[in-house]
Amino acid sequence: MEPTRPFQALSMPALDRVVGRLTGHALQMRADHHGLIHRTMLDHGDYARLKLAGSDALVVSSPVGATTILQSDASQYDKQNHGYRQIASVLGDGLFTADGQHWKDNRVVLQPFFTKTTLDHYAVKMRKHAQNLADSLRPGRVEIDHEMVALTLRILGDCVFDEDFEPYVPLMTEEFVSILEIVNKRVINHVPLVSALNRAEERRFQKSLARFNQAVEELVGKALADPSRAASQTSVIHSLTADPATRDPKNVRDQVITLMFAGHETSAVALQWVFHVLSVHPEWRKRVEAEVDAGSDEMPVLRRVIQETLRLYPPVWLLTRHIENDVVIDGLAVAKGTLILVSPFTIHRNPRYWDRPDVFDPDRFLPEAAATHRRGQYLPFGMGKRACVGTNMAMLELTTIVSTLMRSVRLDPLPGHTPRIASSLTLRPDGGMPMLCTRREQVAAKGGIE
């Protein structure tokens, strides 16, 4: 495609106050990168410029642009950029951060853990863990964010690692959260001197990372010490170590830690928002309750509710890419070295492509309505060859957990708490998701009064 407009012709937000000639938008990015990128789409359209210190960035909020970058011309884009380098300081060259043949080799080994056959097996385990949580919930305040992290970790361990992850729940809810908070600050910081001066933070980061690496080493060692499990290939660890292309100890560590993060974080975040939107839309909650009480296998209403929640709150809300050569995106000439920012969140909230984009309306995903969605308009799991390997597992997990819990409990907003989006790597709710829990039998005893 021949370019029809230059990059420099794009509009951009006002620069940082006072020092903007030096920092561009870097200070605004550091203060609230989610808010900056969302405002940029609303004020400047499908494509807009940002200046991050001395570098150019392109904010892409267009389905056409997303499809070009992530699918049709994906080979021209890689993950060798500032953000992924910071994430790789923890995850290493795992499936989320790697490129090229290394990524392909590991994808081939991991793919069998997410086939239909394995998902059917996982469904039984998911229901068991979800029911255990449902039975344990008591009336009153519940920290749904903590409960969902712990639940998705247990499921991940049982399904993908053939391991009891209960001992790792405190590590992931405390130590790893601390690591991610530091990484998030570094990802959005484009003024390197700021991080370099924070030596106390670096010491805390290295201490937490060492503890986490030790736990992963113990997990791998425990799995490999059991010959019977190694022969059955029921753990991803055994599959990685059995293949010559992936058995290097560092690679095993990187893939394990990536799966421990990506395999629970995104589902846990999505579940928090699902329970929130149902609590503030009681008409949809009633419909889902009726559906799960009827024992429907398909549960189309719940599935639409989940799809719409993922539209409004995609856990992975920002995808970044690096380009080694000049490219053309939807007629726009973009020079090599430009940082590409593709935001599923802004595409999902773009009024040019969605009617009333901030309104919760699961009927957008009725078959006849979904058929009108253009390619790249809805991408909660990414798209193209780098789309999430666990997409089908995630949808099964979300459906299973929500339906199982809703048969037993009803979750309502906690008075005085309004969840807001945190400016973080994933679309976590700022301040967690405390909610009020009522047993469904109590609701029935009161005559179903809302």
Image (cartoon, rainbow, N blue to C red):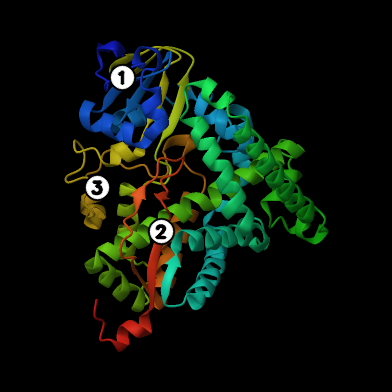
Q: Nearer the viewer, residue 40 or 385?
A: 40
Residue type, label 1:
Leu
Quick one: which residue is furthest to the bottom in this view? 445
Q: Position of residue 245 (x, y in %)?
A: 71, 35
Q: Which mark is residue 433?
A: 2
Of the residues under marks 3 and 2, which one precedes in the sequence? 3
Q: In the image, 157: left or right of 225?
A: left
**How far is disc 1 from disc 2 in space, using C-alphas?**
34 Å
Does 353 appear above or below 57? below
Q: In the image, 121: left or right of 40?
A: right
Which residue lies under the disc numbered 1? Answer: 15
Of the residues under marks 3 and 1, which one precedes in the sequence? 1
The residue lying at 57 percent from left, 64 percent from top is: 121
**How far is disc 3 from disc 1 in space, using C-alphas?**
40 Å
Which residue lies under the disc numbered 3? Answer: 371
Residue type, label 2:
Met
Of the residues under marks 1 and 2, which one precedes in the sequence? 1
